[in-house]
Amino acid sequence: MKQGYEKYIPFQPVALPDRQWPDKIIEKAPIWCSVDLRDGNQALVNPMNLEEKLAFFQTLVDIGFKEIEVGFPSASETEYEILRTLIDRRLIPDDVTIQVLVQARPHLIHKTFEAIRGAKNVIIHFYNSTSTLQRKVVFHTDMQGVIDIAVEGARLIRQLTEEEAARSGANIRYEYSPESFSGTEIDNAVLICQKVIEELGATPEKKVILNLPNTVEMATPNCYADQVEYFCRHLPGRDCAIVSIHPHNDRGTATAATELGLMAGADRVEGTLFGNGERTGNADIMNVAMNMYSQGVDPKLDFSNLKEIREMYERCTEMKVGERHPYAGELVFTAFSGSHQDAIKKGLDYQREHDSEYWEIPYLPLDPADVGRAYEPIIRINSQSGKGGAAFIMQQNFGYDMPKAMHPEFGAVVKAACDAAGRELQPQEVFDLFQKEYLDVCEPYALKSYKLYEENHVGQDTQVHFEGNLYFQGQGHTVSGVGNGPIDAFFKALQTVGITDYTFQSYHEHAVSQGADSQAISYIQLRTPQGGIVFGVGIDPNISLASIKGIVCAINRAEAQKK
Ligand code: KIV
Ligand code: ZN
């Protein structure tokens, strides 16, 4: 045998030079069929028990699936029992069709019909493998032998369906899969499906589902799309069929294969939540549906509580959804990079200020709220975060809206703390840094008491008087000053004890609610004697006192920086 990559045979694509699918756009949801309880379940280390399958089934119904493959009842007693429980406990809503899988073999088909008794809407899904490789190494038969198996299966299924429908009035439909469709010569795949739908008496009113499994993903997704388009264009009686696709993910491109397959003419998609399934799994229906959703197309499936869906999935399957799994992973709404954080903040500000109808936020293709996620975890703070990241956390989590000019100063404080800790900081830790840096500074100056009052004389501007006790150098000092406002009056008072070096630059204030109390927060910017800029923050129910506290804080910080 050849060695290494040379032992692999490259896939031979279908010749379709006039392919139409590249110009198509997905504009509506396909018919979805969940195969979680069959293809997904059969690939679990510990297959789901009855209670888990029932919980999973209920979630699929809640999401909005109208077709659900519930198992392979002729293959195992457990699967038989689960199907009977769903039917006997009347757990299947009238608008949901259950699908059961069976090989095209007579004794299994008979057992399947026993299992579905009492169900209102059923799809009997039968299959046999048609691929070139399996004919050669597994079945040792030619294409005619494979067609005979499928056609005989179809004949028996049609007969048993007609008997059951006459007996119970059940609505039974048919699905046929040429298993390993993508590994089958395309004209053979068309031929066997044509024979099957003829045998089943398909009409445009009574369509048969023809499911085209990419049982093992063998090539780039465009090759699968070519196969699907070729099939749709060459199948005699295309209007008597619902063309379904069933991609697997061996090359990691099942989502792309599904999307290109839809562009190529498929009407229906089979897949699983989070792509569970044999080997690398099946197509991830949540991923495909949310891709549509984020393109403005209603997927007709509801993933607004994706977190709960994920929890149910992880509990029942004992599988884990990866942290970067599209839409569902723990980290998919988290921006670590500073430039991303700044852009997200600007996008959210723009959205709010312009009351925009559309979601246009850089780096966030989906509004996290649409899948039940909150905004809080969007930005996490590490040493790569930009100056806007810490400000964003303070605004989003604690309602502190720092002036823009202050972002670099506090950003540097947070970055230094991240570097020192060698890890990412949680929002509460960012708050604690803010508290320590701005709110807990009471040296060398501490305001012990104060009085502010206005003096009004007719025809003159209002004068504000400040009187207070400022503690420094180990003792209290009485200070007083008069100005045209509280800030001016306080500066004048400071001058009386020799604090003359600081000049007021700007202030910014807003209300901040903490519990039941609404407080005012004031951000004060001063120029230092050395010509630098320093910020101080004051919080108080009284807006004037908040500003005065902010001035004391700024001076204290500047004094500390001198040391
Ligand atoms: O992947 C596959 O080919 C299947 C068939 C049984 C439909 O799951
Ligand atoms: Zn499969």
Image: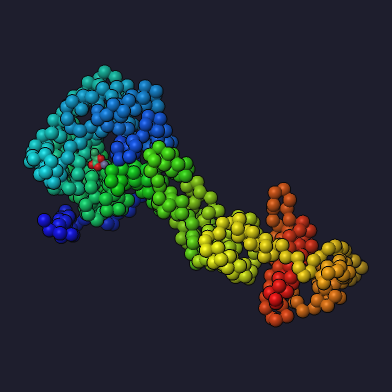
Percent from the top left, x then y, of residue 193? 17, 39
x 79%, y 69%: residue: 445
Percent from the top left, x then y, of residue 132? 12, 46
Find residue 240 and report its image quarter.
top left
For the N terminus, the image quarter is bottom left
x 46%, y 60%: residue: 363
For the C terminus, the image quarter is bottom right
In this image, 211 relative to 290: left or right? left
Find residue 143 and report its image quarter.
top left
Percent from the top left, x then y, of residue 408? 60, 70
Q: Relative to 403, is 372 above or below?
A: above
User: Which residue extends farthest right?
Assistant: 457
x 14%, y 36%: residue: 195
Residue 438 is at least partly visible in this image: yes
In this image, 201 relative to 480: left or right? left
User: Which residue extends farthest top?
Assistant: 167
Please tell me which residue lies in front, 552 or 521.
552
x 29%, y 22%: residue: 117
Residue 203 is at least partly visible in this image: no
Q: In what quadrant does ligand 2 lie?
A: top left
Please tell me which residue lies in front, 312 or 213.
312
Percent from the top left, x then y, of residue 181? 19, 45
